[in-house]
Image (cartoon, rainbow, N blue to C red):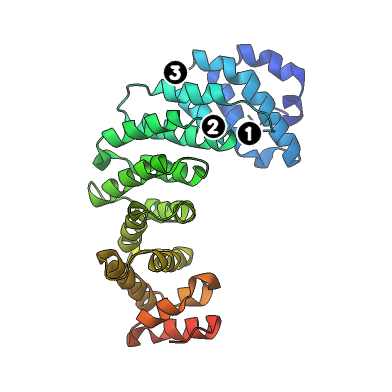
Amino acid sequence: GAALQWDELLGEELWAQVESMSNSKILKLAAGLANPRHIPASGGRVSQLGKTFAANVEPKLEQMSTEEKLQLCVHVGKISLAKGSDVSAYVSAASEAVQGSSDLEALTTAALAVAKLSSKAPGDSAALLGIAKAVEAGDATLLSPKAAGRIADAIRAMSTMPVTVVTIFVRVLVARLKAGEKLPVGTRAAMLSKTHLPLRTSGMAPEFCELLLLTGESLVGEDISDPVKERLLEIGSTLLDTVPYGSPSRTRTEKLLVDVATRYPAAFSSVPLRFLTTDIVDILPDEASAARTAAVQRAGVEA
């Protein structure tokens, strides 16, 4: 990929060669366009490049293996595309590639590809719904950390998708957290940061609360970074605003916040102010005085 002059990418010469280009070369190009840090060009030029690339490479999909096809679809989903780009062929290719499949690696790759592609050209969500149902039909306990990460990435990309699709993916992650081998700390921390905002925006259904709670509870006491400690406080704050008084979820949310306050009081000094509420200060016990003081000083909220 590096040998290719990016300026050539806009020229006809390169596109004339696409026919004879190997699939691995095309995937390399796609990966380069998906992470355009190496392209000395403005954003507008990169998205024009993306549009040209997607249109010219589309015929090659038919000659690719399932794995290559899915990889290409994920890359195109990540590439910045100029307005008017038609990605429907990629959506079809990804969903057809896993038609009837029960391979969770392939299915979650297709889910990520279609979620990313659909966010560029919102439209028919049937393809993603079909993939989501196939993922749910599999054994969630067997989801690898990478597959779980792809589902979290898909949720992050699904702002334009119907809540039904998001809900299915959330249920799969909840099932994975409840059973099977414990996911690595990094995977769980990433799941939390990728899903918090989309789930909050989608209306925090009970399943969404359960996913955030389970993930948050599983991270307390682990070796986590300061940003993740803040994230635990953020989701605790979101949940406290959402879950009903007197419910088991409320009890768990309050316990999570007390754990964060006693173990990671510094999070209360650095978290965005909007997450520090009177409700949180009210539930903090005496042994969380450092967190309480930080919250009162910063937010002016009184206990």
Instruction: Please state the horizontal and vertical placement of residue 130, each as a whole percent of the image.
Output: 38, 29
Quarter where residue 50 is shown:
top right
- Counting every numbered tag in the picture gives 3
Instruction: Please state the horizontal and vertical placement of residue 211, each as a whole percent of the image.
Output: 34, 54
Helix, strand, or loop for circle 3?
Answer: loop
The local crowd at label 1, few if under 14, some if 14 to 19, many if 20 or more residues have their Cα within 10 Å, is many
The label shown at residue 123 is 2
Q: Which residue is painted at 46% across and 25% down in the image?
A: 94
Instruction: Please state the horizontal and vertical placement of residue 102, each as a whole percent of the image.
Output: 30, 27
Circles 1, 3 touching at the beta carbon (< 8 Å): no
Quarter where residue 34 is shown:
top right
Q: Please report whichever mark, 1 or 3, sits nearer to the chain's N-terminal start.
A: 1
Instruction: Please state the horizontal and vertical placement of residue 79, each as a whole percent of the image.
Output: 61, 35
The local crowd at label 2, few if under 14, some if 14 to 19, many if 20 or more residues have their Cα within 10 Å, is few
Q: Which residue is painted at 70% across and 37% down in the image?
A: 39
- Residue hosting label 1: 33
Q: Distance between the residues labelled 1 and 3?
A: 21 Å
Q: What residue type is labelled 2?
A: Gly
Quadrant in which the C terminus appears: bottom left
Q: Distance between the residues labelled 2 and 3?
A: 27 Å
Helix, strand, or loop for circle 1?
Answer: helix
Which of the pair 21/106 is nearer the observer?
106
- Residue hosting label 3: 65
Q: Please report whichever mark, 2 or 1, sits nearer to the chain's N-terminal start.
A: 1
Q: Which residue is painted at 48% across and 51% down in the image?
A: 198
Q: What residue type is labelled 3?
A: Ser
Asked if residue 194 can be seen in this view, the reply is yes
Q: Please report whichever mark, 2 or 3, sits nearer to the chain's N-terminal start.
A: 3
Helix, strand, or loop for circle 2?
Answer: loop
Residue extending furthest toward the left: 179
